[in-house]
Image: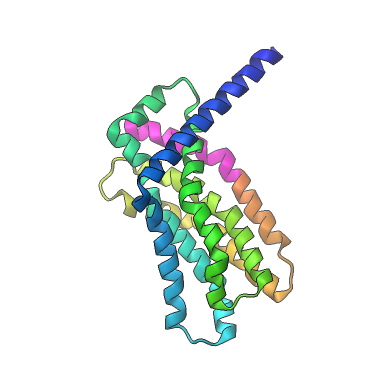
């Protein structure tokens, strides 16, 4: 029994990494689509200081919120193609017919999407945060909050992407569906930097972000896979 269970676990992991690797390679072949969210993130963050009073206190106060809202919008910009291209070429139907759990395949797609669209935002955020005169400690807190929070955005967004699969104007519907669900992540993420700057302690914000991540990891792949089945029927 133990050998059977271990073999099944190895099989599931190999299927997961195969799907993950496939989506990464496909995204790298379409570099323009992969780089669009990153360019959008950089442009939006760079434009805000030009339209604000250059006073240091104002920039430091608004910086974390601007960075987090820009990350949220950049993530939404790329959600429409999470399942759309596989749906168009018929490979999504083949994935559904695969004996492996669909939720596992969906999780692999979400993680690949985050590595291509979300992780670059996390890595470049500290550099862009310098425009808002954030100190090194605040930049570290900002980066950690994005590292925990952006996967939540991708996981929750996958549910909206699956529900609007094949619908004309689906990108607008995704925004309507998932924006209310993004609000807690936005509040805890941006609030963690402000809590650090105020010296009131930021443990609570990170605990809540971590709880959101754990809940999304447990719930979102199952919900998105169910929505994919409904949308492809």
| Residue 38, quarter of the rendered image | bottom left
Closer to us: 45 or 215: 45
Of the 4 image quadrants, the one containing the C terminus is: top left
Q: Which span of residues is magenta-colored?
A: 215-233
Of the 4 image quadrants, the one containing the N terminus is: top right
Say whether residue 198 is left or right of residue 29: right
Tell me which residue sits at (65%, 65%) in the image. 140
Predominant SS of the magenta segment: helix
Q: Is 129 contained in the magenta span?
A: no
Seen in the picture, residue 227 relative to 52 is either above or below; the reply is above
Say whether residue 92 is left or right of residue 1: left
Q: Position of residue 21 (x, y in %)?
A: 48, 35
Q: Position of residue 61 (x, y in %)?
A: 58, 78
Tell me which residue sits at (46%, 48%) in the image. 116
Tell me which residue sits at (53%, 76%) in the image. 131
Closer to us: 138 or 174: 138
């Amino acid at each position: 029994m133990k050998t059977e269970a271990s073999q099944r676990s190895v099989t599931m992991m190999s299927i997961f990494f195969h799907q993950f690797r496939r989506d990464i390679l496909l995204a790298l072949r379409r570099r323009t689509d992969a780089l669009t969210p990153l360019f959008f993130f950089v442009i939006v963050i760079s434009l805000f200081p030009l339209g604000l009073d250059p006073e240091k206190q104002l920039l430091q106060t608004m910086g974390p919120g601007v960075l987090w809202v820009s990350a949220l919008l950049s993530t939404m910009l790329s959600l429409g193609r999470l399942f759309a291209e596989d749906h168009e070429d018929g490979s999504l139907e083949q994935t559904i017919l695969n004996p492996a759990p669909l939720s596992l395949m969906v999780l692999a797609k979400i993680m690949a999407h985050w590595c291509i669209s979300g992780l670059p935002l996390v890595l470049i955020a500290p550099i862009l945060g310098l425009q808002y005169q954030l100190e090194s400690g605040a930049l570290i807190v900002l980066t950690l909050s994005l590292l925990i929070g952006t996967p939540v955005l991708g996981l929750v967004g996958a549910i909206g992407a699956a529900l609007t699969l094949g619908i004309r104007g689906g990108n607008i519907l995704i925004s309507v569906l998932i924006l209310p669900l993004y609000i807690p992540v936005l509040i805890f993420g941006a609030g963690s930097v402000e809590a650090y700057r105020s010296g009131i302690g930021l443990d609570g914000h990170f605990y809540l972000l971590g709880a959101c991540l754990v809940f999304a990891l447990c719930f979102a792949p199952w919900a998105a896979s169910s929505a994919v089945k409904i949308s492809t029927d």
